[in-house]
């Protein structure tokens, strides 16, 4: 057969990555027809997953000998199919991270520019100081002379000294303390920007595509699968690689304000809430909630977390003593001073304590009063509580 793929042919350009050409085919279970074309970029996203690579056949090999290629891929099991939605999601996250790193690098460049300018100023000060020292030395030498010529030289040096002193005063009116303070602030900003980049790269590695793929949502009931599909990190964090299921025990739009009647004395609860303006948020805790406890419940396992779904932000517990707050007049409430507080009417609440009990340091939060709800009050239109069942 010996057909050849050419880079110049536009029909071989990848739709998702136009700068790359198609170079491989992907086959589904027992299929004799390819279901997807892959470019080098598509393959690089999945290069560590052997089960995916087993179904990938180089395009040139298939054109040369399709019969052998199909026999090789027809023995692969159905569960080894890749989740291309997750691949696409990770690619989007990579793009976001790239933009974020570019912004941080721009800030780092500003810091470096400031350090260079400061170094030049310090060098100028050193030169002026040396010049001043030389004049003082000459004055001391001339002052020991008794001649008329020495008196003239002394007067000239004295005028020169006065000129240098005035120049120093005009150029460096700011104190050394101010210079050091500015240097310290910029150095701190420089270090913080570096840490943000390091944390983002670490988080991306930690939540890499095949780690998420290993905890995918394919085997979950459709209702919770739809809830979590845009933020699979929630499921991953709860399951920790174990097989789990979710049982819906309360739904505000159906059960009304009978939250405690449905949830009292329950533990391992995932709560997902939606505000009137479309913001989604909630939390998970293994702790048992008790209606009449009227106190904090500690989480020694430190597995509780809260989240802002729309922003894809997850905040882990950092103070075990105040994981949740059980009170008969409250709805779901997390943290001391309330990282998230929902009143019993499901309309009022606040997030005044956001960041006190749950760690928000990885994210930029401009206004903690509106960051979670999108407003200062939750005004819930929906609240679903799932009991997590560990099998």
Image: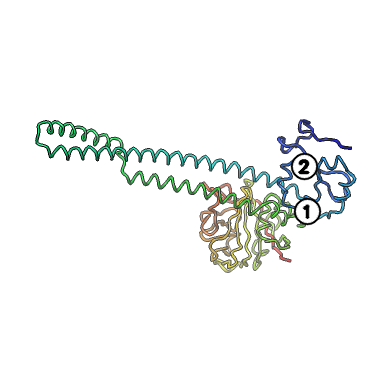
Question: Left or right: where does residue 259 sit relative to residue 125?
Answer: right
Question: Which of the 4 quarters of the picture holds residue 91?
Answer: top right
- Judge by depth and name the residue closer to the eye, 354 or 102: 102
Residue 156's spot in the image, x, y percent?
17, 31
Please tell me which residue is depicted at 13% across the width and 31% down the height of the picture: 152
Comparing 304 with 47, the one in front is 47
Eyeballing the image, is 276 above or below 304?
Answer: above
Residue under pointer 2:
38
| The C terminus: image quadrant | bottom right
Residue 218 point in image, percent of width and height: 76, 54
101 is higher (above) or lower (below) than 244: above
Q: Is residue 137 rendered to the left or right of residue 116?
A: left
Q: Is residue 76 left or right of residue 296?
A: right
On the image, numbered disc 1 is attached to which residue?
A: 51
| Element type where label 2 sits in the image | strand
Query: In the picture, residue 251 is in which quadrant?
Result: bottom right
């Amino acid at each position: 057969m010996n057909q050849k793929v050419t880079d110049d042919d536009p029909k071989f350009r990848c739709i998702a990555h136009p700068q790359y050409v198609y170079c491989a085919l992907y086959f589904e279970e027992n299929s004799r027809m390819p279901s997807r074309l892959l470019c080098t970029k598509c393959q690089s996203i999945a290069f560590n997953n052997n089960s995916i690579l087993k179904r990938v056949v180089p395009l040139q090999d298939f054109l040369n000998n399709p019969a052998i290629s199909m026999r090789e891929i027809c023995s692969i099991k159905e569960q080894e199919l890749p989740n291309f939605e997750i691949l696409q999601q990770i690619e989007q996250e990579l793009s976001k991270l790239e933009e974020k790193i570019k912004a941080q690098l721009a800030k780092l460049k500003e810091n470096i520019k400031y350090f260079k300018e400061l170094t030049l100023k310090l060098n100028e000060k050193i030169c002026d100081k040396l010049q001043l020292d030389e004049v003082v030395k000459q004055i001391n030498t001339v002052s020991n002379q008794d001649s008329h010529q020495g008196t003239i030289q002394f007067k000239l040096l004295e005028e020169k000294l006065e000129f240098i002193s005035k120049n120093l005063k005009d150029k460096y009116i700011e104190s050394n303390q101010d210079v050091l303070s500015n240097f310290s602030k910029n150095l701190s900003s420089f270090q913080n920007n570096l840490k943000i980049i390091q944390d983002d790269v670490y988080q991306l590695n930690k939540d890499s595509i095949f780690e998420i793929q290993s905890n995918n949502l394919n085997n979950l009931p459709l209702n919770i699968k739809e809830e979590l599909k845009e933020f699979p990190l929630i499921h991953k964090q709860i399951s920790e690689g174990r097989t789990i299921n979710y049982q819906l025990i309360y739904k505000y739009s159906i059960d009304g304000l009978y939250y405690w009647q449905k949830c009292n004395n329950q533990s391992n609860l995932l709560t997902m809430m939606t505000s009137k303006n479309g913001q989604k948020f909630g939390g998970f805790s293994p702790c048992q909630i008790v209606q009449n406890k009227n106190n904090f419940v500690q989480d020694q396992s430190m597995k509780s977390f809260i989240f802002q779904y729309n922003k894809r932000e997850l905040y882990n517990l950092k103070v075990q003593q105040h994981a949740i707050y059980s009170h008969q007049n409250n709805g779901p409430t997390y943290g001391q001073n309330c990282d998230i507080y929902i009143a019993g009417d499901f309309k009022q609440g606040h997030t005044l304590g956001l960041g006190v009990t749950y760690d928000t340091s990885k994210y930029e939060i401009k206004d903690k009063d509106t960051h979670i709800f999108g407003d200062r009050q939750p005004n819930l239109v929906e609240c679903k509580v799932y009991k997590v069942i560990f099998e």
